[in-house]
Image (spheres, rainbow, N blue to C red):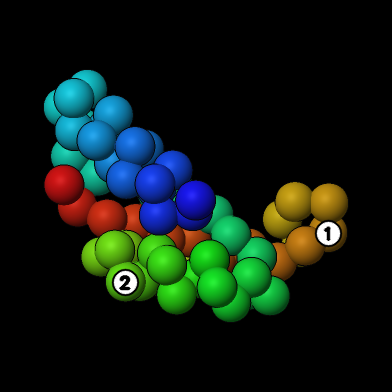
């Protein structure tokens, strides 16, 4: 399910002629982080206590 959603997100971004996409995730979501890396996303930044006091990793992918 996660792979299908991620692929739809990437396809939609390409249709809209995006050059780069970003997403944020919690460091504790290991399966999600593996999915993003497997699909070419790279960790680009870290936000400490960002959303409701939770740390977030910023991932990006060039299209």
Q: Is residue 37 visible?
A: yes
Picture coordinates of residue 35 (x, y %)? 42, 67
At a point 32% along the width and 45% down the height, the residue shown is 7
Q: Position of residue 17 (x, y in %)?
A: 16, 27
Residue 41 disc label: none
Front label number (2 vs 1): 2
| Left/right of residue 37 with respect to residue 20 in the rendered view | right
In this rendering, position of residue 62 left or right of residue 7? left
Residue closer to the observer: 1 or 55: 1
Judge from the rendering whether residue 23 lies leftward or rightward of residue 13; answer left or right.
Answer: right
Q: Label 2, label 1: how many angstroms apart (C-alpha)?
A: 28 Å
Q: Is residue 47 visible?
A: no
Tell me which residue sits at (64%, 70%) in the image.
Answer: 29
Occupied quadrant, residue 36: bottom left
Q: Which disc, if any, is residue 38?
A: 2
Which SS class for mark 2? Answer: helix
**Eyeballing the image, is 39 above or below 28?**
above
Dot 1: element: loop
Residue lying at 70% horizontally and 66% vertically, measured from the top left: 55
**Residue behind mark 1:** 53
How busy is the neighbourhood of tag 1: few (under 14 within 10 Å), some, or many (20 plus)?
Answer: few
> Could you say where residue 30 lies in the image, as x and y percent from the top left?
58, 77
Q: Is residue 16 above or below residue 19?
A: above
Q: How many residues crowd mark 2 within 10 Å: few (<14), some (14–19), many (20+)?
A: few
The quarter of the displayed image where residue 21 is located: top left
Q: With respect to residue 10, does 42 lie above or below?
A: below
Q: Give the total of numbered labels.
A: 2
Instruction: State the residue at coordinates (55%, 73%).
Output: 31
Question: Which tag, 2 or 1, sits closer to the chain's start?
Answer: 2
- Quick one: which residue is furthest to the front in this view? 1
Extreme right residue here? 52
């Amino acid at each position: 399910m996660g792979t299908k959603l991620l692929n739809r997100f990437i396809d939609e971004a390409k249709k809209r002629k995006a050059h780069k996409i970003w997403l944020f995730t919690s460091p504790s979501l290991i399966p999600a982080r593996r999915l993003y890396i497997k699909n070419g996303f790279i960790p680009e930044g870290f936000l400490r206590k960002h959303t409701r006091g939770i740390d977030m990793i910023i991932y990006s992918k060039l299209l």
